[in-house]
Each structure stands twice: as structure tokens, then as C-alpha cells.
Image (cartoon, rainbow, N blue to C red):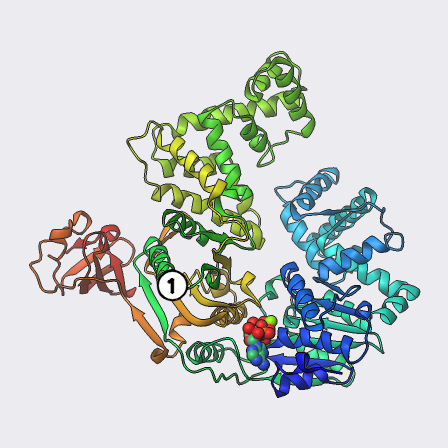
Amino acid sequence: MDVSAILDPLNDEQREATSAPPGNILVLAGAGSGKTRVLVHRIAWLIQVENVSAYGILAVTFTNKAAQEMRQRTESLLGIPAAGMWVGTFHGICHRLLRQHWQEAGLPQSFQILDSQDQQRMIKRILKSLELDESKWPAKQALWFINGRKEEGVRAEHIPDNGDPVNRQLVRIYSAYQQTCMRLGVVDFAELLLRTLEILRDNEQLLTHYQNRFRHLLVDEFQDTNTIQYALLRLLAGKHGSTFAVGDDDQSIYGWRGARIENIQQFSKDFANTQIVRLEQNYRSSGNILNAANALIDNNQGRLGKNLWTNSGNGALLDLYAAYNEQDEARFVADRIQQWVNEGGKRTEVAVLYRSNAQSRIFEETFIAATIPYRVYGGLRFFERAEIKDALGYLRLCVNRNDDASFERVVNQPPRGIGERTVELIRQHANAHSVSYWQAATACIETQQLSSRAATMVGGFLELIEKLTKNILDLQLYEQIDQLLHISGLLDHHRNDKSEKAQSRKENLEELVSAARAYEHNTEDELSPLEAFLAHAALEAGDGQADAWEDCVQMMTLHSAKGLEFKLVFLCGLEEGLFPHQMSVEEPGRMEEERRLCYVGITRAEQQLVLSYAESRRLYGKENYSMPSRFIGELPRDLLQEIRPQIMVKQSVPATFQASHASPEDFNGIDIGRRVLHTKFGEGVVLNCEGRGSHARVQVNFESAGSKWLVLAYANLQPL
Ligand code: ATP
Ligand code: MG
């Protein structure tokens, strides 16, 4: 038998793991050391050499895209289709099992999956039926509680009464929620996993069937499995199964969603005779990139520890760009991408990575302007996000009362007690009389076609829009949007919710204010700034994004970049408070997870890594002056090449400047050594000055805030 196709492309340790006799194996290795490659080769080995049927293999990956790739790579190694093999995410696999065993699971054959929005809506209805006041019992809190318990494998009836009234009430909601789900035949995401675990655990026949079938379990990205996923693996493996897990403790980045890094240490205790294989050679990145990653992660405590090396040479230094602001950062990235393409590189080889979804907007706009095709992964583009569309819906309605789509979208968003039945009545009236929903709503109230409660609610909504329109009439565009977010209740709606998702929605809404502030209205056109901005948003949502097959730049959050690799990687927004994220600065323990996320980002790069931060950034509607991220400081200086924009530096010229009104010519009138006052940072002394025009900036040593570079045009410095 010729196994050279399977073994030849591997090094000794990889070969050892791939060709080990069936049994439990844990491959514990750093980024880019070939874990995923080994897992694929292991599958091929099992099928070809150990004569395992593809039907007996269950492989778990982190995304559907990775699952597809795994199947393709296995089949091309084998030269035949691996029919019958199950490859998928934990959720996908559990869904498949429940579809096949709906009866055992006590579900209707056509059970539906609830996404988190549906889930929340259902909880709201339950709160009402339990006569609980939503202001005291926010639906989001209940949702968080329920999902959290489910992810730990805990049902409402298992939660002991500890006498705490809050806990007691949440358990009551959980219990009622679950009953409703069962009655309606729907399951949420966490339920997919829990229900599967339960039917396997409680149904011996079924469990034996699957234990006999899936004798070989393989798991990629094992460090990010949660309690229930781990329990499922143990159950399926039973006494006779072989589990092959590959992972990297340094890349565990989903702790906030219940992943348990401890599962790695636990593995060899729970899975008999585990053979641990370590891979140390990195095949992905150049020496400089790898050394930077190693140095960074060395700042974490309690690591399992590993020593990654490469023999691919040092390669280029890491570039570090100190941008003036977020626009300068985006322009710089766009220029570098153009340069890459001019030198013969492909756009698909380039990734722009960021910590927070809201950062994508400025890159999207810059890429569109520079005609660089791009694709945003694992998240919607800015103007397509639900919360942004809600906000725009209000604005559209202010501009045009007859915009029915917007009326429908926001009439009960945030929820104000206008039910589907009322909206249906309005729709029917509109259709029957060929008028807009707005007109129909007005008519329905006048002719008392709505119940008095519904009439009050709908009337309130109409008034709200009228009031909004009046209030924002004379304001600047960004103030109009800011007002809208407050008056409509949209911001509060997301603010009251403490979940990560709501946090990001709120941030996106605030980012919309930034977008408006930065939006340059072309005064030649006929539209009002608001109308022009709405048109701009519609166009950007429409066709900015490249088609999947087009050669385009890849944009994604660091979380979605896990497992992937690119020749040129931009790691953007390396600022304290943004990355590491403010939430982790405040919460000890999370900082290490942020550092692992940075490690994941750095190790995506094969040839070139460009780091950037902005000295001032308008994000979430506010102007921020942040320190460069601590992670930059943790990288060895000799690996970094600092890039400053082409600037003219002139020093010691007469002190005649008025900072806030500085024109390009008189800017250089700044005196080094002069005392200045800043509204936020207080008094300080000018240490340095650089640049011209809108790029003009000064370095000031503030008494309390330390030394900072400020963009003169925004800094509003008062000479003292
Ligand atoms: P991550 O931790 O980021 O998921 P990984 O450990 O799964 O990384 P892979 O993605 O499997 O690493 O491999 C990284 C890169 O190195 C891939 O391009 C892979 O094809 C290549 N590679 C792995 N092993 C070898 C080898 N023995 N010879 C040549 N290239 C290899
Ligand atoms: Mg991998």
C-alpha cells in the first residue's frame, strides 16, 4: 500500500501523530504548526491504512467553511469521496442528530430553530404572561441566564433554591420558557447541544449505536470547547472510541462564551492512555513574525508552554504605523494594499483584522473610494446591520412619511406594544385604500378601527416621528442622528442589555454618529445633508462588497480569523481600550484572553505583518485619544519598523500660533517649550511638533496625563 501521499508532506512529529495506532491522542501545539493538517492526514490514514469506514468517522471543526475544507482536503488525499463521514461544527452535528431522532428527543418532526432574536421575543412574551415588569426583569438578562445554564448542562429543575429571590425568579422564567419551547416545538442554539447530550445519555440503545458507529472522533480547535461539548465527546467516545484532539491553549479566545481552556488539561485524565504529541515547527510565518508572537504570549501566566521555531528565515520586519486618526489608518492600509497588488500580489492573500465590528466601516468606505474590492467575513457590513437599519428607518420616515418599509421596520422597534395584529390592520387598510401605511395608521385611528389601546400606541408612534422631525430640523447631520438614537429609545433598548452582542449593537449605533460626523456633504447636490447621507448609506449597503469569487481583500474580526492564514496581515486599532478591549481592562482574567486574541492575529501572517494604531479615533460617536496598545510594548523593539507619514519637521519658530485656527502656513509657528492647556488633559509643555495642514501635530507633556501626540486641528490647545 502506498501511503506516501499521506506521510511524505509531514515532519517526524506530525507523522507520529498521524500514524499512531488507534487510541486517544492529544496534539498540543502552537499556531501554524500543522495541527489542522495533521488532523486531515489522520482521517486519510484511518481510512486508507486502518481500514476504517468513512462512515465511522466524526470530525468536528469550528466553522462550516472549515468543515467543507476538511472534507475536500481529505478526499483529495484519498483520491476518493469520503461518503458517510460526518464533518461539521458541534451545532451542525447535534442538529443533524436531533433531526434523525426527533422522536427520542420529544420534538415534532418539523422542529424549528430559534435564533437569538426570536428567543428574546419569546422571553418577552413569557415575562408578560408571568406578569413580570420588564424594567425590573430585562429579557436580555433572562436570556443570558437561560443560555448560560444550558451551556453548563443545567435544566431549570436542577437549580437548587438558594433562597435568593432573583435567582428564584430567573429559574421560574427559565422553566416557563422551556415549557413554551416544548409546546411550540422550537429549540434554541444551546438546546441543540443539551438535548443531544440528554438523548444520548438517557437512551442506552441510541448511545451504543453511535458509540459503535463513530469509533473515531476528531476535534480541531479543541481549546475552545465548552462544558457540554466536552461532555458530548466523552459520552460518544465511551470506553472503546478513539479521540484525536488538536488544540493550542494559547489560542483559547472564547472563554467569554463558555469555552473552557481547562478541557485541555483534563483530556488526559478523562480519555484513557492519552498520547500527547507536541509540534514545534511553524510552517506558516516568517521568523520575525513568529518571534513577535512568542514574545507577546510569554506575558501570559500558567501556559502549558511551548517552543515554536521556523526555518523559513527571518523575513521582513513587522511594520508599525502610528496613524493620526482612523481615517489616516484606513488610507495607509489602502495604500499598502495597492502597493501589494502593484507588486503582483493577490487581494485574497490580504487580511484586515480588527477587534470590534464597528471598526470595519471606515475601512469599507476607504476601500470603496479607492476601488479595492473587499469582503467582510463573519458579520454584516456596517450599513446592513439590523440596528443600523433600524436607525436609518427612523430617519427615512422623518424624511418621507410614506416610506412603508421603514414604517413597518420601526413601528414596534424598540418594542412599544404595537402587536402584529395592529400592523396587519394598518396594512389591510393601506392596501384597500391604496394609501401609505402612515396615512392608513392615521385613518385607522380617526375612524376608530383600532382598539383604544392600539390606537394610543400607534398614535404615540406617529407623534414620536413628528416630534423627532421637528427636533432635528435645524441640527447638524450628526446631531440629528444622535438625537434620533436617544428620542427613539433605540440606544436605551440596547444599552439596558449587558450581553456582548447588545454591547456591539450599541457601539455600532454610536458609530453611526461618527459616520455622520465624518460624512462630507456635497453642497452642489440638491439633497439635504440627511437625504444625501441616507442615499449614501443605501448605496454602501447595496454593492460595496465584492462577490465571493472575486479577488478581494478579506476583512474580519480577530475572532473570526482563527485557523486561517494570509500572506499579508493588517492588525488595526492597536489602542488601549479598543484592543485590549475596555471590558477586559476592567475585568481581570480577561486580559490574558485578549492577549491570546492578539497572538491569534499575529500568527495569521505568513510574510508581512503590519500593525497600526491611531492617536485619535472617532469611534462610537466619540473622539478618543488613546495610548498605543500594551501589546505593542510587549513586542521586541528590534522586530518593529516604525513608519511615520512623510512629514516636514520644523522646530523653534516664533510663537504666534492659535492652535484651533492653524492654517498650514502658520502651524509651524508653534514654540517648543510653550505651556498649553487642553480641556481634557490639563496643562502641559510642548515637546515637539511635526507635519503640516490637517496632519499638523504636537507632542505635549501633560502634567497629569503624561506625554501625548495630538492632532492640532482637533486638539483645541490654548497657549498659556
Ligand atoms: P492554527 O493554530 O492557526 O490553526 P495549525 O497548527 O492548524 O494552525 P495548519 O493550518 O495545519 O496549522 O498549518 C499551517 C501552514 O503550514 C499550512 O499552510 C500548512 O499547509 C503548512 N504546513 C503544515 N505542516 C507542514 C509541513 N510538514 N510541511 C510543509 N508545510 C506544512
Ligand atoms: Mg488549525
- For disc 1, the neighbor class at 10 Å (few under 14, some 14 to 19, many from 20) is some
Q: Is residue 113 left or right of residue 350?
A: right
Residue 466 versus residue 138 in the image, above or below = above
Q: Residue at x 41, y 76 (%)?
A: 634
Residue under label 1, please give it: 340
Amino acid type assigned to the residue bearing label 1 in the image: Trp
Expressed as whole percent of the image width and height from the top left, the position of residue 29 reads 60, 80
Say which of 220 and 653 sits in front: 220
Q: Is residue 555 left or right of residue 367?
A: right
- Which structural element holds mark 1? helix
Q: Residue at x 80, y 63 (%)?
A: 197
Ligand 1 quadrant assignment: bottom right
Say which of 41 and 486 sits in front: 41
Residue 115 versus residue 521 in the image, above or below = below
Q: Which residue of the protein is positioned furthest toward the bottom in this rendering?
A: 12
- Asked whether residue 35 is in view, the answer is yes
Expressed as whole percent of the image width and height from the top left, the position of residue 540 reads 45, 42
Q: Quadrant of the N terminus?
A: bottom right
Say which of 32 and 577 sits in front: 32
